[in-house]
Amino acid sequence: MRTIKRDQAAFAQLYDRYSSLIYTTVVRMVKSTEEAEDLLQEIFMQIWNKASLFSESKGSVYTWIVTIARRKAIDRLRSKEHAYKGASLDEGSSLAVPDPAFMANPLQATISAEYESLMKNAFALLAQDQRTVLELGYYEGYTHVQIAERLKLPLGTVKTRMRQGLIKLRDYLKAGLREERG
């Protein structure tokens, strides 16, 4: 990753490629466009400042960035002691809430729409119990313990469902990306 060497052009490309995807994820978690915009700036500042910590052997750039974004959003939720105020997961929650002003760039809008479609299709293929724990953990910011309490399940069951769901999601997404490319 050229950003490690403080290459500003590479960082700009990284931002262009991932900012709309990260914004969509973060706004879904914090439920505020203002906070999501603020977090997006913090996330990319952290990426710039900590680029040297990235290791290809541990995962892709996308995974690393999403992990940073998720942690930042969860920290923000916890620091402000946000309570879960969203609709029930069974009421057809959306995986993304794009901001029209942010999505004014046609390329960003296209990439975000393709990513959202791929994610929705992959999520739809998961078992409901796996989808529920993943949405609570990754989009609502709940910890494993909080999910277990909320769903009245043993902690081990929550962790197993989450892991199995992530593995299936990864496999579905890999298959979907292969189909799109070739």
Image (cartoon, rainbow, N blue to C red):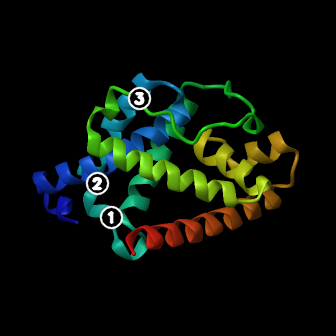
Residue 3, by quadrant, is bottom left
The answer to whether mark 1 and mark 2 are in CB contact below 8 A is yes
Task: Determine the CA span between mark 1 and mark 2.
Answer: 8 Å
Q: Position of residue 62 (x, y in %)?
A: 39, 59
Local SS, label 3: loop
Question: Callout 3: few (<14), some (14-19), or many (20+) C-alpha neighbours within 10 Å?
Answer: some
Of the 4 image quadrants, the one containing the N terminus is: bottom left
Q: Which residue does the numbered mark 3 point to in the structure image?
A: 99
Q: Tell me where residue 66 appears, x and y as whole percent.
A: 44, 52
Q: Give the alpha-carbon distance from disc 1 to disc 3, as whole Å.
A: 29 Å
Reading the image, the residue beneath label 2 is: 50
Mark 1 or mark 3: whose residue is earlier in sequence: 1
Above or below, 49 against 3 in this view is: above
Which amino acid, by three-letter code, is at mark 2? Lys
Q: Position of residue 128 (x, y in %)?
A: 78, 53
CA neighbours of label 1 inside 10 A, class few (<14), some (14 to 19), many (20+): some
Q: Amino acid at mark 1?
A: Phe
**Figure check: 86 above or below 50:** above
Residue depicted at x 65% and y 46%: 135
Q: Is residue 53 left or right of residue 172?
A: left
